[in-house]
Image (cartoon, grey):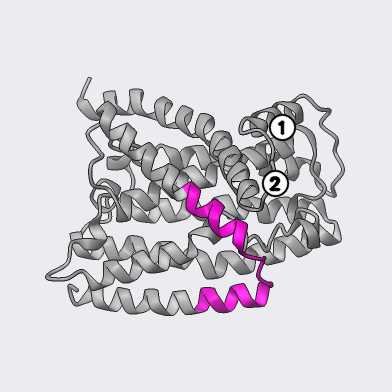
Amino acid sequence: MNEGLARALVGVPLNVAAVLLLAPLLQGVVRKVTARIQSRLGPPVLQPYYDLLKLLGKEDIESGESPAMQRFAALLSLASTLALACFVPMGSRAPLGGAGDAILLVYLLTLVGVCTLLAGLAAGSTYSLLGASREMMAMVALEPLFAVALIVGAVHVHSLRLDAVLCGSVYAARGFPWSGMIMLAVMLLSFQAFVQRVPFDTSEAETELMDGALMEYSGPKLALFKYAQMARLVIHGALFVALFAPWGSGAGSPLDWLLFAVKLAALALCVALVAAVHARYRIDQAIRIFAGLLAAAAVALILAGYGR
């Protein structure tokens, strides 16, 4: 058995288990910290686990225009999220990092958003369709940002392989890494949107759209969607760490896993802080912000082409 196959057989279950176990925990931490900042008691840290178990135990009610599509979208949402976990380093090398490239990663990230679009269209209600349209607008503006970040790293290392790109490659420039620093600022400013938190959770907007595209969902299907949404923080946090703060991790030792956990916890605390002190943006405000970030990302890509 070669080394790559052995790493995949061990690493894939570990990464998937890490996402499944950490996602509700981070969700609970974010909710608790947000409540404390707002002078509220907040729910218990373990409440997301209880919520998921409760939803999984409920009756699976079919209430949309296309129940088969609703079931498919719910399963595909969590499946594509867990597939992403296999290509992302989490304290050690990505189990399938050598088997994929940046293009595949962009496809999988986009597929997660497409599942939400399918969910809204399959439900067919007014609120779900409005939530799906907002999700589509956000995807058009957001997904290019992450694609540009990956391309900037790929240009610097002259490779699209994930094990080459997801290792701080955005800083591998001649002299001062201007392109990497610009993309770091862009991704920090857009991270809240990637994990669908206030002030950029416009496609859900509970006070406006009553959970948007997922309004007509309940029971196990809603649990799968909620699980996938919780996992966004773990997946995008791991990608952010791999691209912009990979130092001190990658060998797979206990210290590496501890450092990764500390970095992920720091990102979660930042998400909670921003969510606690900001009001939700309107969709037109959010799109204008994304457009400005996309312009900055285009500048970074041009600089990367010149080796800067």
Q: Amino acid at mark 1?
A: Asp
Residue 11 % position (x, y): 35, 28
Q: Which mark is residue 194?
A: none
Q: Nearer the viewer, mark 1 or mark 2?
A: 2
Amino acid carrying mark 2 in the image:
Arg
Look at the picture and state if 127 lies above or below 287: above
Q: Position of residue 288 (x, y in %)?
A: 57, 79
Q: Residues within 10 Å of mark 2 (few under 14, many from 20)?
A: few
**Is residue 36 part of the magenta span, yes or no?**
no
Give coordinates of residue 62: x percent, y percent: 85, 38
Measured as percent of width and height from the top left, residue 55 is found at 75, 31
* Front in this rendered view, residue 193 or 115: 193
Q: Is residue 279 magenta?
A: yes
User: Which mark is drawn over residue 40?
Assistant: 2
Whether residue 87 sits left or right of residue 223 in the image: it is: left
Q: Is residue 87 visible?
A: no
Q: Residue 185 occupies which quadrant of the picture?
A: bottom left
| Residue sitting nearer the eye, 130 or 183 | 183
In terms of secondary structure, where does tag 1 sit?
Answer: helix
The span shown in magenta is 268-291
Name the one closer to the observer, 124 or 235.
235
Residue 75 is left or right of residue 268, and the answer is: right
Q: Residue at x 44, y 56 (%)?
A: 106
Q: Secondary structure at mark 2?
A: loop
Q: Is residue 193 visible?
A: yes
**Residue topped by disc 1:** 51
* Label 1, label 2: how far apart the Cα atoms are: 20 Å
Residue ID at (17%, 67%): 173
